[in-house]
Image: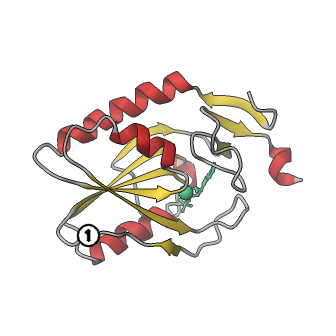
Amino acid sequence: MHKDCERILLNEDELRSRVKEVALEVDARYQGKRPLVVGILKGSIIFYSDFIRHLSCPVELDFMVVSSYGSGTVSSGKLRIKKDLDKDVAGRDVIIVEDIIDSGFTLANLKALLLERGAASVVIVTLLNKKERREYDVAPDYNCFDIENEFVVGYGLDYDERYRNLPYIGILKREVYES
Ligand code: IMP
Ligand code: MG
């Protein structure tokens, strides 16, 4: 385990089997359809690539870079689109794939934006859900794990752009972000 982690919250086996289970549920819903799978960079990359490999329906991939965070651990309350989609979402069935839903700010805003642009449907798939922290009226349609209010890293998630490559989800030691 990385020295900056307090403990491993979800190991590789747990991630692999639950991601597969959720992906198969989502897949069942899209039979006969051709969804646009929108990954929110960068945190979702590993989850996204594991997730899409369990889909049997034809998919199109696209990505957005948004940020509501600087380098800290608290949301700054302003969504910035740093990279927009390449595809037009009008009339499309969109699946948003996100690493974690915290206050809900990012996903509430994104979902509203894509619907405003004419998406036929928008379904939210998250790896992690910090339910307790919700401030905005949005919920994932599919979520892999509910977690407590602790700052986690790994499997794509970062603190200050670090730890994304850890193959597990670990709880970051407080001293790392409080020093
Ligand atoms: P929200 O907009 O408050 O729901 O925040 C969602 C974003 O906050 C995620 O996409 C993450 O980038 C970031 N975030 C929230 N909690 C954590 C965490 O525990 N570890 C890493 N990133 C987090
Ligand atoms: Mg993110």
Q: Is residue 151 left or right of residue 116?
A: right
The image quarter containing residue 70 is bottom right
Q: Can you name the residue that lies furthest to the left here?
A: 32
Circle 1 residue: 89
Q: Is residue 16 above or below residue 113?
A: above
Disc 1 marks a residue whose amino acid type is: Val
Residue occupying image coordinates x 21% and y 72%: 90
Residue 58 lies left or right of residue 74; in this view the side is left
Where disc 1 sits, the SS reads loop
Q: Residue at x 60, y 32 (%)?
A: 168
Locate the N terminus and report the quarter of the image it occupies.
top right
Q: Quadrant of ligand 2?
A: bottom right
**3 or 151: which is nearer to us?**
3
For the point 67% across and 35% down, the residue is 170
The x, y position of residue 57, in whole percent, is 19, 43
Classify residue 158 as left or right of residue 6.
left
Query: Mark 1 packing: few (<14 Cα in 10 Å), some, or many (20+)?
Result: some
In this view, which residue lies farthest toward the top?
Answer: 13
Q: Position of residue 58 (x, y in %)?
A: 19, 46
Residue name at image x 60 percent, y 73 percent? 77
Residue 103 image point, x, y percent:
55, 60
